[in-house]
Image: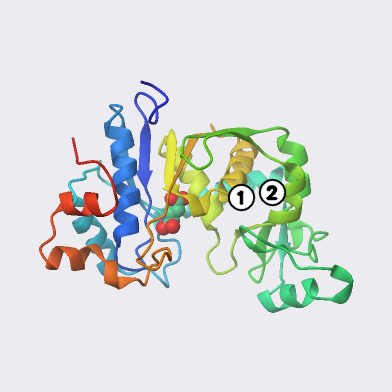
Amino acid sequence: MMGVAGGAGSVTRFAPSPTGPLHLGHAFSALVAWDRARGREGRFLLRIEDIDQARCRPEYEAAIFDDLRWLGLDWPEPVMRQSARMGAYRAALDRLAELGVLFPCRCRRADIRAAVSAPQEGVAVVGPDGLVYPGTCRGRSMAEAGPEDALRLDMGRALTLAGAAAFTETGAEFAGTHGLDPDWMRAAVGDVVLARRDLGTSYHLSVVVDDAAQGITEVVRGVDLFEASFIHVLLQRLLGLTVPRYHHHRLIRDGGGKRLAKRDDARAIALYRAEGASPAEIRALVNLPAAS
Ligand code: GLU
């Protein structure tokens, strides 16, 4: 039955950021990753995505472990924690700098908004990573990079260097093989930030470096991150990393059809627990089959 789920021996992961309580959407994501690994004699790993220390709280992290255990999941210890991985992110940035695909950027959000709304710029494009960067700092060299700079990927150069690349998607909505489309990447994604000035890294860079370090063979996450995968595959190619399979699952929505947000405490797992719900009921609520 290979191919129905992640393939034999799949390594999947759940990678929450401890910035709020886990809600039904998180439980669903973790359970899908768990089921896809377990059903194929694979491994389920946990990773704490805490690069943004200003927003992360130890009590949320403790609650994540507690809720996941209550749901019936377990994972190898110690868990990977992104705040302990800055050296690995630095090394990846050094490699990208050597390849000549990074540039330092001193633009603030307001500068970018002003540049893209200048009359000669036409319509501002909002891509999966926000406003597409207008290229103001693209000519700057890494030799001038300082603490006031973010580091951006020069998308044009990166695409040329990476050449053709594709990934396999196993999620229902976009199932199939997806090649990188350079025109779309240039127009709709652009020069993404890979190292924020305040963090020294970014979601995109960290997730790529860590999925590779953990040997993840199938990345399971919400379909809202489908487009981000194109950035991730491009980075994997540049860094010489194996491209995993991707499985982007449906999103859990509230009664009004809105997707659940971090602050949607009304659907926090802790609340269901306090009201006496069972893990089996949580599975049923998100339309997952009973645990085997
Ligand atoms: N830390 C990310 C989140 O909580 C995980 C994204 C991913 O799985 O790649 O949304």
The quarter of the image holding the N terminus is: top left
Left or right, 119 with respect to 187, comes to: right
Give the CA distance from mark 1 to mark 2. Answer: 6 Å
With 184 as the anchor, is 218 left or right in this view?
left
Image coloring type: rainbow
Asked whether the residues under the numbered discs 1 and 2 touch, taking CB atoms below 8 Å apart as contact, a structural biologist would say yes
Mark 2 lies within 8 Å of ligand 1 (Cβ measured): no
Residue at 64% over, 43% down: 95
Q: Foreground residue, 161 or 226?
A: 226
**Picture disc at residue 97:** 2
Which amino acid, by three-letter code, is at mark 1? Leu
Label 2: how many Cα within 10 Å (few below 14, some 14–19, many 20+): some
Q: Which amino acid lies under the numbered mark 2 shown in the image of this protein?
A: Ala
Query: Hey, which quadrant is residue 213 in on the image?
Result: top left
* The one of 140 and 39 positioned closer to us in this rendering: 39
Q: Mark 1 falls on what kind of element?
A: helix
